[in-house]
Image (cartoon, helix red, strand yellow):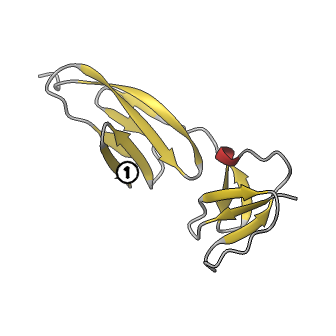
Amino acid sequence: MPYAYFTEAGQLLVIASAQADYPDRTIIEVGVPDNTLPNAIYLDLATMTVEQRQPFDLTVSYNAISGLPAGTSLIVGDSIHVVEDGTAEFDADTAETIYVNLSHPHYLDQYVAVPTGPEAP
């Protein structure tokens, strides 16, 4: 049986084909079924069960992304921002489309295209 190893925050570190002896006692070990996809799971800390990561349920609009779970990381170019209130807003002087990488331990990573530009008068 393979074993999944998670951080104390529930994020997957590795799936191993046999048990490993981690010196860091905060690492959580859980047995998982054969052929478990590493990028598709996380550890629910409330129940200590392995769960499937789900797609984001968000809304992309002009200068904004809403419906983001708290703790979502947004990567735009070289900048990383963490959303805590469910919405990311963008400012731009010219009309363009920016590409944002969304990442959260409970959701499948996703790229979104956000139309941006100056606010209409």
- Taking depth in this image into account, of 86 and 54 the one nearest to the observer is 54
Quadrant of the rendering where the N terminus is positioned: bottom right
- In the displayed structure, 10 sits above or below 27; it is above
Can residue 51 be seen in this snapshot?
A: yes
Residue at 49% x, 45% y is 103
Image coordinates for residue 24, horizontal then vertical, percent: 61, 78
Q: Residue at x 71, y 67 (%)?
A: 47
Q: Which residue is mark 1?
A: 83
Q: Quadrant of residue 88?
A: top left
Give x and y (percent) for residue 20.
75, 69
**Image: 50 above or below 94:** below
Q: Amino acid at mark 1?
A: Val
Q: Tell me if 95 is positioned left or right of 104 in this view.
A: left
Residue at image coords 31%, 36%: 77
Answer yes or no: is residue 67 visible.
no
Farthest left residue? 121
Q: Quadrant location of the C terminus?
A: top left
Residue drawn 48% across the image and 50% down it: 69
Q: Residue 43 occupies which quadrant of the picture?
A: bottom right
